[in-house]
Image: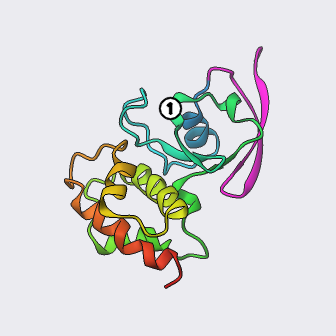
Amino acid sequence: MAGRRRITVKVNGVEYEREVDPKRLLVDFLRDDLELIGTHVGCEHGFCGACTVLFNGRSIRSCLMFAVQADGAEIMTVEGLAGDGKLHPLQEAFREHHALQCGFCTPGMLMVAYELLRDNPDPTEEEVRLAIAGVLCRCTGYKQIIDAVIAAAPKMRGK
């Protein structure tokens, strides 16, 4: 196909090389080309945050970026949290605190919470609220999500 571009990306520690259409969104590349369907497609306008991934260590809305812009980047999706058949402490805390209902916002929430706890291992409730403010949840009312993030903090610090 004319105009396709070859890109190389590292996703969840695995390097991929693919040809993509220059107009292909990163979220579609992750879900359709790499079959990493944990990243959800929500509003497709960057408003809801369901498609949040870490891009070179920082959270971004993958519906607002073209796959070709990710050439050479390192990306972490929600699938990158769990390892060795075990849930990540953050995922465990979400389960324990009933921080999800429909689950649609959960991947985005987990990714922004992971970034927060990585950068700020002992956040206040207000800092958690600010960190997750860009991911919309229509089910939980956020209380359980905040509780889960606060509960995961000491586990991620190794305590």
Point 77% across, 34% down: residue: 7
Above or below for 16 versus 18 = below
Q: Which residue is mark 1?
A: 63
**Residue extending furthest toward the top:** 2
Q: Does the segment drawn in magenta span residue 8?
A: yes
Point 41% across, 73% down: residue: 152
Picture coordinates of residue 34, whole percent (x, y): 64, 45
56 left or right of 157 in image: right
The reply to whether residue 58 is visible in this rendering is: yes
Above or below for 122 versus 27 = below
* Region in magenta: 1-23
47 left or right of 99 in image: right
**Residue extending furthest toward the bottom:** 159
**Crowding at mark 1 (Cα within 10 Å: few <14, some 14-19, many 20+):** many
Point 49% across, 85% down: residue: 159
Picture coordinates of residue 38, whole percent (x, y): 49, 51
| Front residue (pair 129, 31) | 129
